[in-house]
Image (tube, rainbow, N blue to C red):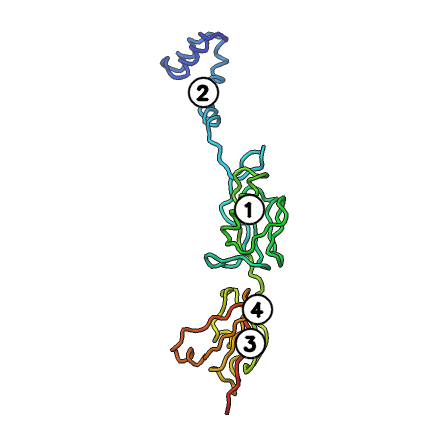
Amino acid sequence: MSISSVGMITRWAFGRRSGFKEGFSRLPTGMRGHRLAVLIAFALLPGFLSAQIAPTTGGASRAGTSMSTPASSSAFSGGASAPVGYILSPSDQVGVEIFGEEDLRTNGRLNPEGNLSVPLLGSIHLAGLTLTQAASKLTELYGRDYLVNPKINVVLLSYAKRRFSVLGQVNHPGSYEMPDSSPGGVDLLEAVAMAGGYTRIAAPERITVRRRNASGDQVFKVNAKRFTKGTGGGFLVEPGDAITVGESIF
């Protein structure tokens, strides 16, 4: 078909000629069969052009592959509610997700050295970091050799089993786990309550708390009677503490 013929059909298609029958009859017989094809071409042209210029969006991708759109929410459900600034420690269970890279998703507990085994990278030390810092560290390591612009999220799934002991004049002496709602410590009176409360001959004013740290053992002498009367600020029992409730002297 010649350029002049296409121009004639185009003018007819856009209504430059008046009247359907009149316009159609003015087209040469050999050109009438092309009318529908031209109309379809004009109808599809805007969509074709917009598809060519549509922007590409996406998140992390492996080098040499197409970009993918990040997920809008965490793939891990039922995780622990970590307080702001929570510091990871050995035996904490965490989940690592990389948006657009489901095969690299993993979860596990930090080993006694504070390391987590992750795909491609191997064993990475995360203890002593906040969740945000852990995500930044993994982002840097993955982005260095494996992924382009990775988007990484680290979530706390469950706390390490943190325990303390309550001995002496309580009804159920023994070792107890820190509640998930208070992973950093519990109030002394709450700890005593978890052990069944004081016995009949207990001396709340004579409580000893032994705490181990890097510099050695610390021993605290605590008068819990002040707390029950509302005249004290309380005492925070930390993971690993050993509480001993003394006996009354008659």
Q: Which residue is mark 2?
A: 42
Q: In the rendered structure, are the residues bearing label 2 and label 3 in contact, judged by CB atoms less than 8 Å apart?
A: no
10 Å neighbourhood of mark 2: few (<14), some, or many (≥20)?
few
Q: Which residue is mark 1?
A: 138
Label drawn at residue 166: 3
Q: Gap in Å between the C-alphas at discs 4 and 2?
A: 74 Å
Q: Residue at x 52, y 67 (%)?
A: 179
Q: Which residue is mark 4?
A: 163
Image label count? 4
Which callout, 4 or 1, points at the residue further toward the start of the chain?
A: 1
Label drawn at residue 5: none
Q: Gap in Å between the C-alphas at discs 4 and 1?
A: 30 Å
* SS at mark 2 in the image: helix
* SS at mark 4 in the image: strand
54, above or below 210, in the image: above
Which callout, 2 or 1, points at the residue further toward the start of the chain?
A: 2
60, above or below 236, in the image: above
Which residue type does callout 3 highlight? Val
Place of residue 245 in the rendered image (x, y in percent of width and height, measured from the top left):
52, 80
Which residue type does callout 4 highlight? Arg
Which callout, 2 or 3, points at the residue further toward the start of the chain?
A: 2
* SS at mark 3 in the image: strand
State which mark lies toward you, 4 or 2. 4
Which callout, 3 or 1, points at the residue further toward the start of the chain?
A: 1
Q: Gap in Å between the C-alphas at discs 2 and 3?
A: 83 Å
Q: Residue at x 60, y 50 (%)?
A: 124
Q: In the rendered structure, are the residues bearing label 4 and label 2 in contact, judged by CB atoms less than 8 Å apart?
A: no
Of residue 155 and residue 40, the one placed in the foreground of this image is 155
10 Å neighbourhood of mark 1: few (<14), some, or many (≥20)?
many
